[in-house]
Amino acid sequence: KNPIHIVGGGLAGSEAAWQAAQAGVPVVLHEMRPVRGTDAHKTDSLAELVCSNSFRSDDAENNAVGLLHAEMRLAGSLIMSAGDAHQVPAGGALAVDRDGFSEAVTKRLEAHPLITIQREEMPGLPPAEWDQAIIATGPLTAPSLAQSIAEATGADALAFFDAIAPIVHFDTIDMNICWFQSRYDKVGPGGTGKDYINCPMDKDQYLAFVQALVDGQKTEFKQWEGTPYFDGCLPIEIMAERGVETLRYGPMKPMGLTNQHNPTVKAYAVVQLRQDNALGTLYNMVGFQTKLKHAEQVRIFRTIPGLENADFARLGGLHRNTYINSPTLLDASLQLKSRPGLRFAGQITGCEGYVESAAIGLLAGRFAAAERLGHAPSLPPLTTAFGALLNHITGGHIVSDDEPGKRSFQPMNVNFGLFPPVEAPKTEGKRLRGKDKTVAKRHAITSRARADCREWLGLPAQ
Ligand code: FAD
């Protein structure tokens, strides 16, 4: 059989190589280190962890990334088995001895009879004769390959920085204070005129909010990250520093909006949230990309009327990050629509984090191997963590209805907002409330996911 070529031996490429080889398909893994380094990697090992040594929560019942761990273990993940073997104490989290972990991954890939590892930089897209290939070159993809990807996908389809606005779970927004309305009730393609959630502020609230943004603690950029601000994506606190009225004439302008709970009183400023996933479970704070420290974001953004109890699926940030506009470019099995047989995997597809990147590598490896063996790739159900994360990447994105064509795709960790909602189970016929309801819903989502994942993998039910 012709091999599958995998470019990049990070978290995603290593897992993809393992999965394809375990399915009986030969693999050539092309990794540029040590021939060429990146600004963050320090070793020659495959699957190097560039920063923290944590795979985050290992709680498969109450936490979405813990659930993803469990599903990956069921699917025979190399990254999870090496992580489990090199675990260090970290409470409920799975943290690993970084050197032991990466060495274990490297050794097991080197020892696999179907895997060849070539230490070389791929300067451009894989040649056409590689009919099955996976690009898994990560957030720090080498510049000449990044250039080729940009040329093949279009100038706007590859980002080099993410400017992330916080995302809020819809069911934690107080709709007794906020209301649905698009500015001037504008109805765009697929829109209803009620596509935004609006949070009203009076003058005192606005002035205090602007001051809090200016005073809030910010994260500093690492030197190599350069100056990432680009047009239309200034951090909210930088806008606040430019003058007290800047936000009121920018993302917080109150024009064209009428408070349904109090129609006679005009809001002095308005924070808008836009639907972020097709399920309608997540909303992003429009224009609120920020470098504020995470704890500061929670503290300051919870002073916004209606967001006092907001639960954030993701907080804002700005990072160096190479990623493609996957919902437009990739099909459901991670294939480039314009070049079938060429897949993307890992953080370059717009997921975030070690575990998520490895999970998408796992799927890409399985999909490519299935095709090489003459089968159609089997997609994980949307109810699993695999399926929910894959759907975040390849579909389900809302494009703003009054700004046609504007990207709404931003990298994200796996979280419960990506799953189809469940009804909270009742106890003795009574509806649950508050924290009990949240816990019951999480349990319902995770047990459904584990059962559906077993079925997808052809494993006996438990
Ligand atoms: P990587 O693991 O980066 O692997 C990509 C591989 O491709 C690398 O080995 C690289 O050398 C190789 N490569 C690149 N270009 C080429 C080429 N042209 N030819 C051949 N090989 C190539 N995530 C967390 O979960 N926790 C954190 O604390 C964390 N901190 C981070 C800090 C920084 C500074 C950065 C940049 C990222 C951080 N991340 C963190 C994100 C994390 O790095 C990624 O989620 C994860 O490593 C992505 O896996 P990947 O396989 O997609 O990419």
Image (cartoon, helix red, strand yellow):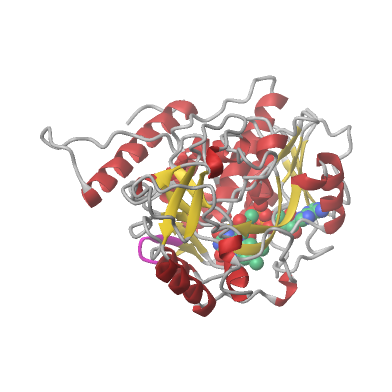
The residue sitting at the front extreme is 264
Q: Is residue 103 visible?
A: no
Q: Position of residue 382 (x, y in %)?
A: 48, 31
- Give the camera-side residue of 54 and 185: 185
Q: Is residue 206 above or below residue 167?
A: below
Left or right of residue 33, residue 454 in this image: left
- The quadrant where residue 47 appears: bottom right
> Does any portion of residue 149 appear in the rendered image?
yes
Which residue is rendered at x = 36% and y = 40% of the image? Answer: 446
Q: Is residue 438 magenta?
A: no
Q: Look at the image and give the residue range highlighted in magenta.
A: 89-94
Which corner quadrant holds the N terminus? top right
Q: Main secondary structure of the magenta part?
A: loop
425 to 11, vertically: above or below: above
Residue 461 location, x and y as percent?
35, 28
Q: Could you say which quadrant of the image residue 201 lies in?
A: bottom left
Q: Residue at x 64, y 21 (%)?
A: 376
Q: Quadrant of ligand 1?
A: bottom right
Q: Is residue 331 left or right of residue 285?
A: right
* Of residues 369 and 180, the one drawn nearer to the viewer in this rendering: 180
Q: Position of residue 298 (x, y in %)?
A: 42, 65
